[in-house]
Image (cartoon, helix red, strand yellow):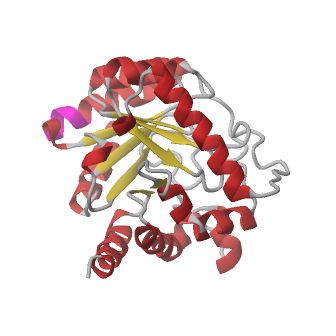
Amino acid sequence: MNFNDITKPLIMGILNVTPDSFSDGGNFTQIDSALQHVETMLAEGADIIDIGGESTRPGSDPVSPSEQIQRVLPVIQAIKTKFSNKVIISIDTTSSTVADAALASGANLINDVSGGENDSAILDLAAKKNVPIILMHSKGAPKTMQDNPFYEDVVNEVIASLKIKITHALETGVKKENISIDPGIGFGKRKQDNLDLLANLWQFVELGYPVLLGTSRKRFMGSICNVTEPSELVTATAVTTALGVMAGVKIFRVHDVKENRQALDVAWSIKQR
């Protein structure tokens, strides 16, 4: 795929093959359950399947590249066998070793929550393989990122950080059309920071790169809605999807494909009227 080819926004369905992800950890660690979930997400309108073998929830510990590879490669290979090349697969990792193995097994793009900071070789890999890469903003490692994060001006600070990541990627040889950006909702952000970013998504869109939004089931919305179970935040997530479409966001990373597909389709129809 090519990020420049995106017209109508895309839904990226989440497939966590991890035991400890914040919302669905342990649900899809077996190949059969993973394949069934992929089939469901595709039927409900997912355009991309994002596969991760390392939880990046607040407080999570890092997972070695070898362990990530053991988790994700069999699933990628099984998806490719069952669905042929009809499925666009994103590998969710900050490791160039994992990304390289995933691409060799059939993944189509890289989703790096560190934006190339954890392992700069991942940018060289994206350039060499000529594959799309999503550069996200995060403040600190997942283990400690929610330990009193602070910003004077979160929107401008995140934009400035993403501009540096973009420049680094371009200088490494990644093509402009292969870069997407993500403001990193919930990654080293306070509740008000997340709200400020969501209210100013248009500023990220104006940078000229497709924007990915990942709010799915995140804790800051639970504090607003007075719920503690992430699975109860499906409607809240869909609201942010609709807002994102109107702001010009191009990719939505979600757990609940059906509901967010509906929100996207209705918002897109309104936007295109």
Left or right, residue 41 beside residue 192? left
122, above or below 26, in the image: above
Q: Residue at point 49% right, 46% down?
A: 181
Task: State the residue in front, 264 or 166.
Answer: 166
Task: State the residue in front, 261 or 234.
Answer: 261
Q: Residue at point 39% right, 22% down?
A: 127
Residue 130, by quadrant, is top left
Task: State the residue in front, 182 or 36.
Answer: 182
Task: State the residue in front, 102 or 188.
Answer: 188
Residue 228, magenta (yes or no): no
The location of residue 69, given as percent across then percent down, is 44, 23
186, above or below 55, in the image: below
183, above or below 86, in the image: below
Q: Is residue 29 visible?
A: no
Q: Main secondary structure of the magenta part?
A: helix
The location of residue 194, given as percent across then percent down, is 66, 63
Q: The N terminus is located in which quarter?
A: top left
The location of residue 232, given as percent across then percent down, is 54, 72
Left or right, residue 104 beside residue 135? left
71, above or below 269, in the image: above
Q: Residue at point 42% right, 22% down?
A: 173
Left or right, residue 5 beside residue 100? left
The location of residue 20, given as percent across then percent down, is 59, 43
Q: Which residues are magenta?
A: 79-83
